[in-house]
Image (cartoon, rainbow, N blue to C red):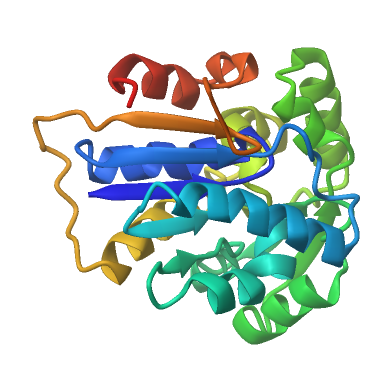
């Protein structure tokens, strides 16, 4: 079984790690776009064109499913990707985990990129899945970029700035960008208030990985004894994991456990 994941950069690591936990035997194809990153500032049309190229590079390796490991690419490019690749290749998008966060009760903060914060896309998700729940949208200036480059100083500054915009009575934080899941514990430490109940964090990686398996009729088998292979594509070229990926536990585990294809 082969599963592909795509993103402009290393934001896909969280979903990749989730796939690896559920199916250690899965062969993985990671399709990144260092020539075109970051995707966020691009127009929807330009971003979609980049995403299609990255997806088609992954599809050439004949995976059973393709995960779009990026919230922004899901918003703008998912309909086009599905129109081009399905039904032959199931395409699974990434959506902020607002629904399960709202189900837990309490006040919610949604940490997202400035472009996503306040967008019609996010507001519609709040309306559909968190109606009646107190929700604060928190723009995280520079956090995704800092995580992408594994810049510890910039990560700390961006997390502190976003935490200052987060109301003190928040009980749940939705990580509305896949990059943020790589620094989830730093976010928890910055937002957790003394004397308050433990902060709940909701990312999308686990749900996305599980959905990919469902789409292809596979079940989790975390005890599978064989480690699947790893293929890395950099704007369509064979390559290796970016050095910044190794700054995170997810990237180190992936590099250590996966034989190269």
Tell me: residue 45, above or below residue 146: below
Tell me: residue 82, above or below residue 131: above
Q: Can residue 176 be seen in this view?
A: no
| Residue 164 image-quadrant placement | top right
Q: In the drawing, does residue 7 fall left or right of residue 127?
A: left
Q: Can residue 132 be seen in this view?
A: yes
Tell me: residue 72, above or below residue 128: above
| Residue 218 image-quadrant placement | bottom left
Q: Where is residue 193 in the image (x, y as percent from the top left)?
A: 68, 37
35 vs 24, nearest the viewer:
35
Q: Residue at x 80, y 48 (%)?
A: 39
Q: Which residue is drawn at 44% across and 17% down?
A: 252
Q: In the drawing, does residue 115 fall left or right of residue 260?
A: right
Q: In the drawing, does residue 39 fall left or right of residue 99?
A: right
Q: Position of residue 38 (x, y in %)?
A: 81, 40
Tally the marks: 0
Q: Which residue is drawn at 40% across and 36% down?
A: 17
| Residue 190 image-quadrant placement | top right
Q: In the drawing, does residue 12 fall left or right of residue 252?
A: right
């Amino acid at each position: 079984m082969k599963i592909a994941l795509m993103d402009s950069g290393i934001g896909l690591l969280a979903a990749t790690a989730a796939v690896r936990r559920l199916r250690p035997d899965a062969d993985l194809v990671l399709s990144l776009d260092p020539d075109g990153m970051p995707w966020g500032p691009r127009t929807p049309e330009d971003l979609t064109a980049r995403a299609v190229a990255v997806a088609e590079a992954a599809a050439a390796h004949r995976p059973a499913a393709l995960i779009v490991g990026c919230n922004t690419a899901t918003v703008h490019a998912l309909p086009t990707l599905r129109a081009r690749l399905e039904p032959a290749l199931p395409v699974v998008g990434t959506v902020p985990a607002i629904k399960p966060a709202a189900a837990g009760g309490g006040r919610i903060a949604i940490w997202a990129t400035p472009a996503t914060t306040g967008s019609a896309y996010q507001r519609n998700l709040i309306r559909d899945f968190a109606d009646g729940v107190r929700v604060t949208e928190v723009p995280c200036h520079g956090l995704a970029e800092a995580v992408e480059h594994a810049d510890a100083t910039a990560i700390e500054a961006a997390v502190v700035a976003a935490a200052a915009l987060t109301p003190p009575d928040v009980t749940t934080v939705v990580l509305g960008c896949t990059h943020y899941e790589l620094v989830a514990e730093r976010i928890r430490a910055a937002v957790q208030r003394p004397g308050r109940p433990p902060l709940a964090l909701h990312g999308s990686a686990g749900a996305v990985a599980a959905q990919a398996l469902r789409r292809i009729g596979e079940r989790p088998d975390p005890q599978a004894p064989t480690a699947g292979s790893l293929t890395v594509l950099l704007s369509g070229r064979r390559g290796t994991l970016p050095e910044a990926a190794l700054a995170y536990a997810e990237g180190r585990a992936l590099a250590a456990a996966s034989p190269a294809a």
